[in-house]
């Protein structure tokens, strides 16, 4: 029988109910831990001695002057450094400060505390330091540069005196340390300045000697120093580049004009970058004369003397143009030749200058190394000299702002320790946390079966019934017992779960002893019998039989006697108070017949009773310890696994199921036994409803019977008291 999974919202609700179930079940542990922590906290709180607190507040800054130092600009007074504040906390609590407080003649803590603690001789400073350190608390005030020094002491006046003294000593210590550090820094800087001055003079002498020796002609360009040779190379290189550009232009022009046809050459020259005015005039005159010739020819005819004169004039202009063009081409060729000669000359000079520069640079290398060394030493000297000047002036500036006492400590009027309400409140909170934590930790360590979900998730088997605690024999409680409904639900689920209609033999197994197999199978058989079925209960737990005690009958003759052929079937079957319920005790088991259940006689016995009865129920020992349970599970038609609530680990239950399946048994499902319905609300909807219903039904029935017997209201008879059923 599959259990449907609830929806997403139900999962969340069930998850919350699981936590609430753990709290209800472990409420004893939670309450015990809670009371233990609260009572212990309260007792310790009232035992602790009273302590007074005095607080002095100081403003702490970095080691800076009251005004901005020279050459550093305006100081940033608002910068917040948490590491700086934390460091000052430790300095306030250091031995340098607290030892001076301890040895102060006004406080004289060594002798004063020796008397307080009953010492005959005064305490050592190290011992007093340990006691004082426990009384001093240093903290930052709300993310500012203010520090609160709090002192806790049994004497309120002594607490305020110590707090003020610590603040004063700390301020003096900061001033001395700052002053001493400045003086020492200036002395070291001056010594280093003298060394650098001597080294600078030596470097300059060496540089001057090398300049004279090598004949270096260098040029000072501010931050750059170089010789004249590279400048000569650059000059020739620039001139060569200019000539090269001009030569390329003239060569290009000459090439274009040379490739131009002769008839178009005269007209092409004025369009280039080398124009000629005279050629332009001749071309203009030629154009006018040709126009005049055309007009006269049309008017006078080609043989007219005027026309012939104009034609001669045209021929003369064309000859002049040809001469002019040839002259221009020759002139351009001369320019190309001239620039070519200049380019070759400058190219040779550039190569020669580069060789000279390379040679000179190699020769000047020692000088440049000495020059760089001199420049480096000069910068170092100037930096140190400037720093000496700055530190000298800064050391003379006042530094009263590094520590300023803003609020002095005053005598406290009432103690602050122990804080009774706070301690008890913390005890309550810690007690609850520890109680809940321990409860959930115990629940985490508990691997036993707790819920139906645990069973179905671990065993992959349906839960057919949930049996409450303190269930007795239903044959004695009667059919109206509220416990009977749980077994009726189990009976219904069992009938719907079996797949073979002819299957009528069933055994109940469990992983360990004491899980309620015998009570479960006896009450289940009783419920079947109450519904009119012919039912036989066989006590097949041959080693520890118990069903005969529920019926208060003898166990002298039973199953073993029949299997050993000592008695017939009719002789070993006994009747009960229910007409349809029959019982077969286990009988006495001889030591020589321990494996009698795994015998042909047992199989023959099962075949016989299957024909005579509607249902046969076999009790069995624990399956983990005795082989009889495995034998029964393999021989009967159906098996039920009983699991007692919160008793054995889940691994043991899983092993029990595997053993049933290994021998070929048919496991219909699981029965959860011994559930405390009143404590665990998780199971209320499985069984609790029926108990409420039958409890009310019993109350109504008792009232009706009382009135019927003539009993007065409020004076119940003895019979009425017997009929009342206790509500579970």
Image (tube, rainbow, N blue to C red):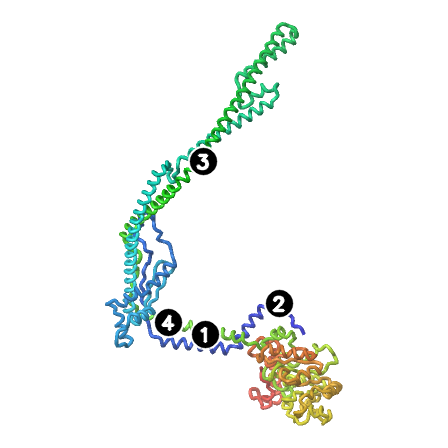
Say which of 253 and 449 sits in front: 253
Q: CA distance from mark 4 to mark 3?
A: 94 Å
Mark with earlier residue (4, 3): 3
At label 4, counting other C-alpha atoms closer than 10 Å, the crowd grade (few under 14, some 14-19, many 20 or more) is: some
Mark 1 in CB contact with mark 2 (< 8 angstroms): no
Residue 442 sits above or below residue 385 on the image: below
Mark with earlier residue (4, 2): 2
Image quarter in which the C terminus is found: bottom right
Q: Quadrant of residue 9?
A: bottom right
Expressed as whole percent of the image width and height from the top left, the position of residue 281 reads: 54, 15
Mark with earlier residue (1, 3): 3
Q: Which residue in the structure is indicated by mark 2?
A: 7
Residue 262 sits above or below residue 26 on the image: above
Q: Quadrant of residue 111?
A: bottom left
Q: Which residue in the structure is indicated by mark 3?
A: 355
User: Residue at point 35% right, 40% down?
Assistant: 210
At label 2, counting other C-alpha atoms closer than 10 Å, the crowd grade (few under 14, some 14-19, many 20 or more) is: few
Badge 4 element: loop
Mark with earlier residue (1, 4): 4
Q: Which mark is residue 431?
A: 1
Mark 1 in CB contact with mark 3 (< 8 angstroms): no
């Amino acid at each position: 029988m599959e259990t449907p999974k609830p929806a997403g919202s139900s999962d969340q609700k069930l998850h919350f109910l699981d936590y609430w179930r753990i709290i209800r079940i472990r409420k004893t542990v939670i309450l015990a831990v809670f009371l233990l922590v609260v009572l212990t906290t309260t007792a310790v709180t009232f035992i602790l001695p009273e302590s007074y607190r005095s607080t002095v507040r100081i403003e702490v800054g970095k080691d800076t002057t009251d005004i901005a130092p020279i050459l550093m600009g305006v100081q940033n007074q608002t910068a917040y450094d948490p590491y700086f504040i934390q460091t000052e906390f430790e300095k306030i609590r250091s031995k340098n400060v607290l030892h001076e407080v301890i040895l102060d003649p006004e406080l004289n803590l060594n002798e004063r505390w020796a008397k307080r603690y009953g010492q005959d001789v005064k305490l050592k400073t190290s011992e007093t330091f340990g006691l004082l350190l426990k009384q001093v608390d240093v903290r930052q005030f709300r993310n500012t540069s203010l520090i609160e020094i709090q002192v806790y002491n049994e004497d309120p006046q002594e607490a305020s005196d110590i707090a003020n003294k610590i603040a004063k000593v700390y301020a003096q210590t900061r001033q001395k340390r700052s002053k001493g550090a400045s003086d020492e820094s200036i002395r070291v800087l001056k010594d280093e300045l003298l060394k650098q001055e001597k080294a600078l003079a030596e470097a300059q002498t060496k540089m001057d000697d090398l300049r004279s020796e090598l004949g270096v002609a260098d040029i000072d360009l501010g931050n750059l120093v170089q010789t004249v040779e590279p400048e000569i190379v650059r000059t020739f290189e620039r001139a060569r580049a200019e000539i090269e550009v001009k030569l390329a232009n003239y060569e290009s022009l000459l090439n274009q004009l040379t490739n131009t046809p002769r008839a178009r050459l005269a007209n092409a020259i004025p369009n280039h970058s080398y124009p000629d005015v005279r050629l332009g005039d001749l071309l203009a005159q030629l154009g006018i004369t040709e126009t005049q010739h055309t007009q006269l020819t049309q008017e006078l005819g080609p043989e007219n003397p005027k026309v012939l004169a104009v034609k001669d004039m045209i021929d003369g202009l064309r000859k002049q143009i040809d001469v002019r063009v040839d002259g221009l081409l020759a002139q351009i060729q001369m320019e190309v030749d001239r620039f070519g000669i200049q380019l070759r000359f400058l190219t040779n000079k550039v190569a020669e200058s580069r060789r000279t520069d390379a040679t000179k640079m190699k020769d000047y290398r020692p000088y440049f190394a000495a020059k760089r060394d001199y420049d480096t030493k000069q910068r170092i000297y100037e930096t140190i000299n400037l720093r000496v000047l700055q530190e000298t002036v800064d050391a003379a500036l006042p530094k009263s702002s590094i520590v300023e006492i803003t609020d002095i400590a005053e005598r406290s009027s009432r103690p602050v320790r122990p804080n009774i309400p706070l301690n008890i409140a913390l005890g309550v909170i810690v007690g609850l946390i520890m109680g809940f934590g321990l409860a959930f930790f115990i629940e985490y360590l508990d691997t036993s079966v707790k819920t139906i979900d645990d069973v179905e998730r671990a065993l992959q088997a349906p839960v057919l019934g949930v049996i409450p605690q303190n269930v007795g024999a239903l044959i004695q409680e009667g059919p109206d017992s509220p416990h009977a409904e749980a077994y009726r639900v189990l009976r219904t689920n069992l009938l719907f779960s079996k797949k073979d209609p002819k299957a009528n033999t069933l055994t109940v197994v469990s992983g360990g002893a004491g899980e309620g197999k015998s009570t479960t199978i006896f009450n289940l058989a009783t419920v079947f019998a109450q519904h009119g079925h012919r039912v036989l209960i066989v006590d097949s737990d041959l080693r520890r039989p118990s069903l005969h005690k529920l019926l208060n009958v003898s166990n002298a003759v039973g199953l073993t006697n029949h299997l050993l052929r000592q008695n017939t079937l009719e002789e070993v079957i006994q009747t009960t108070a229910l007409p349809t319920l029959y019982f077969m005790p286990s009988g006495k088991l001889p030591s020589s017949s321990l494996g009698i259940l795994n015998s042909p006689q047992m199989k023959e016995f099962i075949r016989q009773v299957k024909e005579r009865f509607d249902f046969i129920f076999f009790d069995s020992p624990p399956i983990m310890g005795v082989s009889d349970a495995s034998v029964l599970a393999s021989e009967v038609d159906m098996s039920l696994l009983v699991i007692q609530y919160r008793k054995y680990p889940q691994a043991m239950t899983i092993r029990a199921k595997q053993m049933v399946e290994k021998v070929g048994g048919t496991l219909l499902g699981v029965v959860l036994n011994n559930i405390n319905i009143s404590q665990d609300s998780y199971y209320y909807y499985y069984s609790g409803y029926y108990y409420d219903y039958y409890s009310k039904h019993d109350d109504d029935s008792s009232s009706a019977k009382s009135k019927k017997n003539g009993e007065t209201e409020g004076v119940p008879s003895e019979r009425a008291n017997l009929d009342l059923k206790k509500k579970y």
